[in-house]
Each structure stands twice: as structure tokens, then as C-alpha cells.
């Protein structure tokens, strides 16, 4: 019996077993993890061709003797599965084929899921996280976060940072207006936070990346309409980890009232950008946000939203003790594009220019 599932690819696992029971167990866990394996049962010639390219090799204990006799090239990330506690002989043959471990299913389902996700994701550095937070509501933090993510996406497409994984924009503020609405993708099918509420442990980065709605090439994780409850910290931890493994930059729009979910993001942020209007009351509110955020990150920057007659941006930065990164002038054209669902597209808009400055100034912290 041979099951051709998926296409050969460097990130996909290879399953070698002729046991329908073992194959069914592995395929069930592959589906839960979001990876597509390719399977070789009686055809060891095909298994040999795929052996070194697979991200992970899963071998049923029924196939161990044949593999040992075939003397395949030794490689890392080989897992043997059994349907019950394996006897000592299985361990001996598993070592002979270069297996890292032997798992008994279903007892070790979680361990195999983690191995499948890790093999599919590959090995590489995690993407940096930029968190954007407003000192108060309606100051344009969401707009600036979206503009920064769009600018980074243009850099990737235009060669500014070279080709590579997409940028991910995460809406972590359940009380905001919705980044998907801001970008005009609220009707685009794809994962929302509500689909991820039961997520714990390791989430497949590849599955997350291909399941998110996109604005052009920008991946967006937003809320279901009407949702106000923040996700559990363990859900945020799993989603953010998967997002960092599958994207080149993660930009997060944080709520100004920091909860345990927001703290999970701050703990992993390379930099935080605080958006503050240029008036006295806003600066007073911002001081509390600085106190709440400052203990989590080494790099805290300031973006001042300017209006005619407001406080000077350098004075606000000095008062808060925060580095001034950029200023954002009021922009009526930008407001119109948002109302029309076109998103922060114009590079020459005030928000677009500010986003460019943010990426230039915070480039070292963001690995650019």
C-alpha cells in the first residue's frame, strides 16, 4: 500500500510504514498540525529519494527491519512510532537506522505533533517583533502600525530588504476598530483570533502563514466581529511563536491597557513604539503607559501625533524620557482612504512618511 499525500518538498515530513493503523495515526496528527506528508509504504526506492530532503522522517516500527537492511544514509530528525510501548529489540533497530527517539501512540501524540511542526517550519532565526501602542484611544496607533507593516512589505517586494517571508500584522487590541477593517480585508476568508482560541503548545508556522487573510502580500491576524475577550496567554504565545518562525517581521497593535496577553507580546518585542498626541493630557496618560511598558523592553521609541499649536515633539520626548523616533502630521487624505477601505497606501502621506522613518530609525533593533 502506497499513499501519495502531498508533494515532495524540503519542509514536508516523510512517513515510512505499511501499517494502516500507524499511517492513520500519523495522518491524523499531520492534519492537526497543519502539515502535508508524503508517504512510502512498500516502496523503499521512493523513500530513499525523499530521505534526506524531508524535514522529518517518521518510521513505523513495522518498517524498521527493512530500513535497517537497506542501510539508508544516516540523518537527523528520524522518529520511530509504535502503537504500544516498544520492546527492547525495537529500540535497538531504531538506533541502527539513526532514530532520535521512539514514540508510543497515542500516549506520545503531543510529542509527535511538536516534532512534525518543528520539521515543517525548518530552522532559522525568529523574526523580530515591533509592538505599537497608543497613549490613549483614537491617536492613530493602529494606523501607524498598519503603515509600518505595509512599508516593510513594500521593502520586501521592491528589494529594500530582499525577497523572503512575508510581514505579519497582528491586531492584539480587541477593543480597537479592527486592523482588517482599516485595510479593507474584513470580508477576506482566513483565520481570525476566534479560530485560534483552543491553540496551545506548538503551532505549525507554515499552516498559520498560509491560512491568514492578506492585504496584498501583508498577512493580517485580526478579530472576529464583535469579539472583545483577549485570547489566553498560552494562545498568544503559540501564535506569536509560529508567526515569528514564518515571517520576516511581526508588527503588533497593542491595547493601551496591558493585560496578560499583551505582556506575552511585550516579553518578545525587540522594540515598542508609543504613539502620543501633542497635548498635555495625552502626555500625562502616556507616562503611565511608559511605566507599564518600560520594564519589558530595552528599546522604547516615541511617535508624536502633531496638530497645529500643540506641544513640541522634543519636549514631549524629554518629559517622558523616551527617544523621539518620528512625528505624524494630521492627514485628511489618509482619513479618507481609511473610510473608503483602501488602507494606508500612499507612501507620501504623513503616515507613510512616518512609517518609513520608524523602519529606518529602529532598523538595528529590527534586524534590518
Image: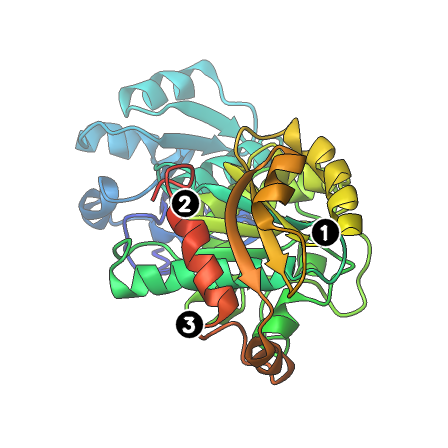
Dot 1 surroundings within 10 Å: few (below 14), some, or many (20 or more)? some
Q: Is there a contact, CB below 8 Å, between mark 1 and mark 2?
A: no
What residue is shown at x 34% (from left), y 37% (from top)? 124
Residue 279 appears anywhere in the view: yes
Residue 354's spot in the image, x, y percent?
Answer: 48, 59
| Mark closest to the chain's N terminus, 1 or 2 | 1
Name the residue carrying label 3: 348
Contact, mark 3 vs mark 2 (Cβ under 8 Å): no
Q: In this view, does 214 lie above or below 328?
A: below
Circle nearer the viewer, 1 or 3 = 3
| For marks 1 and 3 on the same chain, the one whose residue lies earlier in the sequence | 1
Whole-number angstrom distance, CA of label 1 to CA of label 2: 35 Å
Above or below 247: residue 147 = below
Q: Which of 67 and 78 is in front in this view?
A: 78
Q: Between 224 and 306, which is closer to the camera in this rendering?
A: 306
Mark toward the viewer: 1 or 2: 2
Residue 166: which quarter of the image?
A: bottom left
Image quadrant where one finds the N terminus = bottom left
Image coordinates of residue 99 in percent, x first then y, are 35, 25
Residue 64 placed where, x, y %?
33, 31
Image marks 1 and 3: residues in contact by CB distance under 8 Å: no
Secondary structure under the numbered disc 1 in the rendered image: loop
Residue 197, labelled with which disc?
1
- Residue under label 2: 361
Amino acid at each position: 500500500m502506497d499513499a501519495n499525500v502531498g508533494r515532495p518538498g524540503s519542509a514536508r515530513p516523510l512517513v515510512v510504514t505499511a501499517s494502516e493503523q500507524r499511517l492513520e495515526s500519523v495522518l491524523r496528527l499531520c492534519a492537526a498540525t497543519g502539515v502535508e506528508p508524503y508517504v512510502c509504504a512498500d516502496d523503499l526506492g521512493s523513500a530513499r529519494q525523499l530521505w534526506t530532503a524531508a524535514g522529518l522522517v517518521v518510521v513505523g516500527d513495522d518498517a524498521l527491519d527493512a530500513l535497517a537492511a537497506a542501510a539508508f544514509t544516516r540523518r537527523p530528525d528520524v522518529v520511530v512510532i509504535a502503537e504500544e510501548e516498544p520492546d527492547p529489540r525495537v529500540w535497538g533497530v531504531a538506533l541502527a537506522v539513526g532514530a532520535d527517539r521512539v514514540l508510543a501512540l497515542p500516549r506520545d501524540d503531543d510529542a509527535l505533533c511538536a516534532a512534525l511542526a518543528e520539521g515543517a517550519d525548518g530552522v532559522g532565526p525568529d523574526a523580530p517583533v515591533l509592538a505599537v501602542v497608543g497613549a490613549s484611544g483614537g491617536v492613530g496607533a493602529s494606523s501607524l502600525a498598519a503603515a509600518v507593516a505595509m512599508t516593510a512589505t513594500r521593502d520586501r517586494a521592491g528589494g529594500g530588504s530582499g525577497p523572503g517571508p512575508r510581514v505579519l500584522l497582528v491586531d492584539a487590541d480587541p477593543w480597537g476598530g479592527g486592523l482588517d477593517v482599516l485595510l479593507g480585508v474584513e470580508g477576506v476568508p482566513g483565520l481570525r483570533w476566534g479560530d485560534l482560541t483552543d491553540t496551545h503548545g506548538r503551532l505549525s508556522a507554515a499552516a498559520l502563514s498560509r491560512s491568514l487573510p492578506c492585504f496584498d502580500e501583508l498577512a493580517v491576524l485580526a478579530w472576529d466581529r464583535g469579539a472583545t475577550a483577549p485570547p489566553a496567554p498560552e494562545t498568544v504565545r503559540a501564535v506569536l511563536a509560529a508567526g515569528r518562525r514564518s515571517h520576516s517581521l511581526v508588527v503588533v497593535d497593542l491595547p493601551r491597557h496591558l493585560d496578560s496577553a499583551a505582556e506575552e507580546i511585550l516579553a518578545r518585542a525587540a522594540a515598542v513604539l508609543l504613539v502620543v498626541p501633542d497635548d498635555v493630557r495625552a502626555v500625562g496618560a502616556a507616562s503611565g503607559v511608559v511605566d507599564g511598558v518600560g520594564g519589558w523592553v530595552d528599546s522604547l521609541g516615541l511617535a508624536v501625533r502633531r496638530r497645529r499649536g500643540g506641544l513640541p515633539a522634543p519636549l514631549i520626548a524629554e518629559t517622558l524620557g523616551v527617544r523621539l523616533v518620528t512625528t505624524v502630521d494630521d492627514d485628511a487624505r489618509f482619513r479618507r482612504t481609511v473610510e473608503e477601505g483602501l488602507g494606508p497606501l500612499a507612501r507620501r502621506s504623513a503616515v507613510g512618511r512616518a512609517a518609513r522613518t520608524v523602519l529606518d530609525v529602529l532598523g538595528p533593533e529590527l534586524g534590518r
